[in-house]
Amino acid sequence: MNASARRLAAAARKEFRQFLRDRLLVALIVFIYTADMVMCTVALSFDVSNLKLAVYDGDRSQISARLVERFTATDYFGERVPATSLREVDGILDSGRADLALIIPAGLAQDIEAGRSATVQVLLSGTNANTANAARGYAVAIVGGFARDVLVEHAARHGVAVALPGVRAETRIWYNPQLEFRHFMAVSMIVVAGLLVGVITAAAGLVREKESGTIEQLIVTPLRSYELIAAKALPPFTVGMLTLAPSLLIARLFGVPLAGNLALFIAASAFALAAFLSIGFFIATLAENLQQALLLAFLMLFPLMFLSGTTVPVESMPQAMQWMSYFSPVRHYMEIALGVLMKGIGLDVLWPHFAALAAATALLGTWSVVRLKRALYA
Amino acid sequence: MNGSDVIAIRSLSRRFGARTVLDGVSLAVRHGELFGIVGADGAGKTTLLQTVCAILDPSAGSVTVAGLDSVRDAARINASLGYVAQAYSLYGDLTVAENLEFFAAIRSVPPDAFVARREQLLRFSGLAPFLDRRARALSGGMQKKLAVCCSLIHEPDILVLDEPTLGVDPISRRELWTMLREFHQRGKTIVVATSYMDEAVACDRVAILSGGHVLACDRPAAFGGDLEERVKVLLAGDAGAEPAAPDRPRPETKGEAIRVAGLSRRFGAFVAVDDMSFSVSRGEIFGLLGPNGSGKSTTIKMLCGILPPDGGSIRVAGIDVAAHPAAAKGRIGYMSQRFSLYVDLTVDENIEFFGSLYGLADEMMADRRAWVLRLAGLRGHERSLVKNLSGALRQRLALGCAALHQPDVLFLDEPTSGVDPVSRDAFWRLIGDVGRAGTAVLVTTHYVREAERCDRVAFIDRGRLLTVDSPASLRARYDGASLEDIFIALMTRKDAA
């Protein structure tokens, strides 16, 4: 073992001791990768199911009852909240007792009987735009199907047998057949957990040396800046990589297919975690104390998270933002995670993201070492 | 207790968890008295003062201030006295004027009274020219003076100060005491904790605190002779395991450990170090004395190779530091004023870490570890976390860790600030040991009294070297004056020039 390796080993031993002695920190990291992941995946699910439906049936006919039944027969709409007046519908929507309301005017059956065009109204609470948008789609489809049946029946009653030609869009959803938002969310949470843990533990670990003044002592020893960075990175890196196991298990329990080569994903995680740690060290060279470091970390974390497709698809962002996101290691890690864990694709398709991630890691790592050397070592 | 007692402390005890910090303390401070509290680190000085200020409640016993009970009337006591904490209680980002204004506002000082008091305080403190300067940009001494001004802005009857002159240079220290005496002469009561014996002598009465008990309380003269010696005797049992210091004769060590020639460093337009030249021999203990901001730390940083000089040359252990900083680092040891150790690691783990950084291993490591434990009197504490050690033990361990690899030169940047007189004494014996082993020691200090223990002393001010000589020759040159008087004479002469 040469002198540099021996110094690195000594520094790493010291870092592991301090890191593992800080039980709260270790517990928090495990928590972010597991409990946080479960909570966010469950809570941030935008799937539409069991919406509460307020119904005002002004017609009270057999035909209006059939329409209502068509709504409640689906999984999308669950509990039915009956309303006796239009005013009551307002109250139900205002108070949040229902997510949407179906209003059937008096005379629906009469109009249909007479061959006139009829109208029903669907009122949606737009407070959650995602849910409202999905619910509107379902409602339009249900009413459309109902109208078509009404038309066929009407023609039959008048002795005309119609065979309405129709074109059906036969859709198949790949990678996530039930179109479960949860799968996406679970994968996204693994990426976000790595980002949070990497940036914050690195920033806090280095700033602590600054705050306690021990950094001065280190600077006058033969310990080099890259040895210090490597030693500081090792404990959070190790714990971050180990906690991938429970994270993947949780993702599996949520139904994520984990279709691809897990080794590929683990390699990508190693690169990504190293990049995130480098960002943290960079922050620590700017900050004087823990408070500043955390604020700076959040300043960088939020754009990195939101611009990298962890919550909204990159494709739905403005073109300029999409260009910017190519520089984010988070985006490439996210693409690899989705590709491997959901689509089961390999390096043949993902290699550009892999190359970009590796380049970002090398660049950020070098940059943080150079910054530390400049900021502290002279 | 008689009617003139303004502070009455009766059988006061204070515990923090299982730890008893004050144990049955009874004291009375008379109206208009200048009352000193002396004690080692961890004797309970700060806790006692904070209980008097009604910041902490007693665990047992009682404290009354001007007839008010410290538990029931805490708010009224807080309002009626001024407290200068050990840590600066100023807002670094606010200017001198803004700090004064803020403290006046929270004390509800009426505007016209504020203007008058402000003028008076500024005059006494000499802070008037710095009204628009941010507090953090002031020197340590001026910050303390400002803190005292802020505590006096509401004209309290009682002023409580916790080691106000800690880490303050001798000139600022004298000025601070002039302020305190002026306040005292107006019939006000002052309670001050201090570790300077010359300050304790200036008090009307002194209480000596040790391990949460009052050992003695009397007029300084009543202690007889040198108060510092008396206190050392009284506190002797208190300093923990005495470090074993074999008094070997100094080996004949010749040769230069440090040679500095024409050293300069500017920060923008500010000249921090100006054409400094000196040399230190192997085994020599060399003191660097100067007020805050005189360039001591900048000099040490350049000597350690962590700050490149603008001009001049530095050779440490024969190595050109600017050209080969990495090589020089292996030959030096450094201890900063903050005792930079890892408090969440044990004594052994700290020794092992610093030793390994310098490439110590196996037998060598075991040898040096034993040396540090013996030197610092830490045997039996090997597995203690550093955070559970007293300040004095930490300081000795920090010295041990800095000298672990037997460096050619050891730099100590104000190593004794915040340490009580007994521990300071023991520490200087350790420095002597390190020197006798052949290591050159360059030490900066505020305590001019400590400079007496150096082989040679350099006085610096505003980046310039004023004089270098042995303490004995200096005294001879200045007709037998004390080093402190010489220091002040040198600095004030510069001011006048």
Image (spheres, coloured by chain):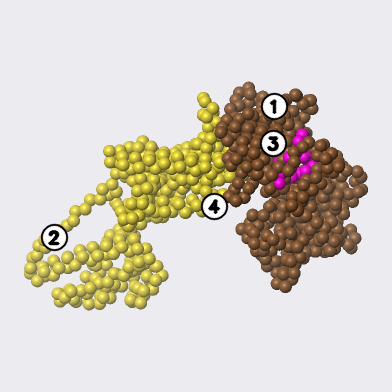
Chain colours: A yellow, B brown
Q: Please provide percent x and percent y for residue A23.
A: 56, 42
Residue numbers of the magenta segment: B442-461
Task: Decide which of B213, B87 is in the foreground and name it.
Answer: B87
Determine whether the residue tagged by mark 1 lies in a helix, strand or loop. Answer: loop
Read off the chain for label 1. B
Describe the element under mark 3 as helix, strand or loop.
strand
Residue B460 among magenta residues:
yes
Instruction: Tell me which chain the residue with mark 2 is part of.
Output: A
Task: Tell me, for residue B255, which label it has, or none.
Answer: 1
B214 or B396, nearer to the observer: B396
Classify mark 3: residues with Cα within 10 Å, few (<14), some (14-19) or many (20+): some
The residue positioned 63% from the left and 26% from the top of the image is: B365
Number of numbered discs visible in the structure rendering: 4
Quarter residue B52 falls in: bottom right
Q: CA distance from mark 4 to mark 3?
A: 41 Å
Query: In the image, is B188 to the left or to the right of A97?
Result: right
Determine which residue is flagged by label 3: B278
Residue A226 lies, with reference to residue B491, above or below; the image says above
Instruction: Give the CA distance from mark 3 to mark 1.
Output: 14 Å
In front here: A80 or B345?
B345
